[in-house]
Amino acid sequence: MAIKHNEKTKRWEVRVYYKDVYGKRKQKHKVFKKQADAVKWQSEFLL
């Protein structure tokens, strides 16, 4: 799980890895304008 700031686009990127119901590793990627929104989304996704 990583939250990184992209200097080029001035946005926050979140990458979360998880396993689906079949046991395959999946990745979810989302971009936000504010760091607080990125942290909130990541914590809610992991629940």
Image (cartoon, grey):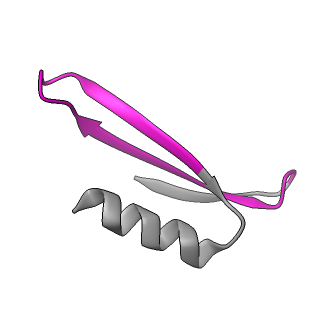
Asked whether, in this view, residue 21 is left or right of residue 9, the answer is left
| Residue extending furthest toward the left | 22
Image coords of residue 37 (percent x, y): 56, 72
| Residue extending furthest toward the right | 8
Image coords of residue 24 (percent x, y): 21, 22
Q: Residue at x 33, y 58 (%)?
A: 45
Q: Residue at x 12, y 29 (%)?
A: 21
Span colored in magenta:
8-30
Say which quarter of the image contains residue 4. bottom right
Q: Residue at x 72, y 66 (%)?
A: 33
Quick check: is 29 in the magenta stretch? yes
Q: Residue at x 83, y 57 (%)?
A: 7
Say which quarter of the image contains residue 25. top left
Image coords of residue 22 (percent x, y): 12, 21
Say which quarter of the image contains residue 20. top left
Asked whether, in this view, residue 11 is left or right of residue 4, the answer is right
Q: Is residue 33 above or below residue 31?
A: below
Quarter holding the C terminus is: bottom left
Asked whether, in this view, residue 9 is left or right of residue 4, the answer is right
Image coords of residue 32 (percent x, y): 65, 60
